[in-house]
Amino acid sequence: MECVTTLEKSQPPKKLRKRYEAFFAPFGRFLAKTGISPNTISVLSVSVSILSCIAYASGSYPNVGKSLGLLVGTLLLGCSSLLDMLDGSLARAKGVAGHFGALLDRTLDRVSEFFFLLGIMAGGYVYPEWVFFCFEGMILASYIRSTAEKRGGLNMDSTTGIFERKEKLTLLSMGCLIEILIYENFMGIEDWWFFEFGFLALIVLIIGFLSHISAFQRLRYAQKFHASLEEKKA
């Protein structure tokens, strides 16, 4: 049973989310006429994320170079994210945004994030420990939401928390592009004063911290939700 409380109603949808949903709505209506399913686009999004992983990882080879690996990997990351947005718009346009579709979308989102970070780690851009920390934060935020909905009857919107998936990937892409500029314009990047691996490593670390903060916020939100239920029962 879905429980709706004053606490849930007080959670306003983020403006950014509403804006990009409105922007992609016409594309969703167009795709709805083609007969393609949202799940097909979701699978295609993951396939592109695998290619992004390969591109990032190829930066460790001298004949490719770190800048080229970052550039191609980031372009493919953007394509994968675009497809992820389109599958949601298509599902809303076709009116088929059901429970399994949502489950599949969340699952494949985590798979895509894994491949993005795996490629960046394999390319030698970021310490492996920091990549694990970042991915653990992403998984934790998603796990708390899913568990709260399944076992606690809480309808937790994905906007609960300061850091959504789109924001994480946007920040990651910006970090990659800035890292390219550093590689192309500064000599002796390994001696750069900031970090051994440079700006992208810092971005991955920031995403990890913000993901853990989002996870904690969702946990607190669930705690307040259940506390409000207990007060009503008393």
Image: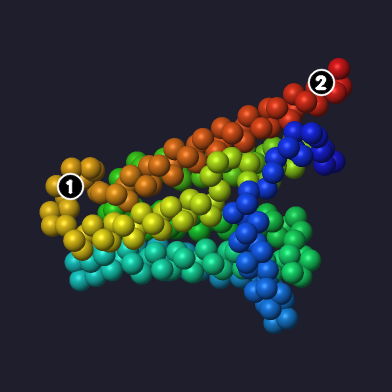
Q: Quadrant of the N terminus?
A: top right
Q: Which amino acid does label 1 sit on?
A: Trp
Answer with the quarter of the image where residue 74 lies: bottom left
SS of the residue at dot 2? helix
| Residue under pointer 1 | 192
SS of the residue at dot 1? loop
Q: Which amino acid does label 2 sit on?
A: Glu
Q: Which colour scheme is used?
A: rainbow
Q: Using the image, determine if residue 205 lies above or below residue 226.
A: below
Residue 61 in sight: no
Answer with the quarter of the image where residue 205 lies: top left
| Residue under pointer 2 | 231
Within 10 Å of disc 2 (Cα), the crowding (few <14, some 14-19, many 20+) is: few
Q: In which quarter of the image is the C terminus?
A: top right
Q: Using the image, determine if residue 40 lies above or below residue 194.
A: below
Do tag 1 and tag 2 residues touch (Cβ < 8 Å)? no
Q: Residue 89: x, y in percent?
A: 67, 66
Q: Residue 90 carries which label?
A: none
Please report the residue visible at 65 percent of the width from the left and 74 percent of the height from the top: 27
Closer to us: 217 or 41: 217
Mark 1 or 2 closer to N-term?
1
Residue 15 in sight: yes
Q: Residue 58: x, y in percent?
A: 30, 66
Please report the residue visible at 33 percent of the width from the left and 44 percent of the height from the top: 202
Please report the residue visible at 48 percent of the width from the left and 51 percent of the height from the top: 168
Please report the residue visible at 71 percent of the width from the left and 74 percent of the height from the top: 29
Q: Residue 121: x, y in percent?
A: 34, 53
Within 10 Å of disc 1 (Cα), the crowding (few <14, some 14-19, many 20+) is: some
Q: Residue 111: x, y in percent?
A: 52, 56
Number of numbered discs: 2
Q: In this view, does 213 lie to the left or right of 118?
A: right
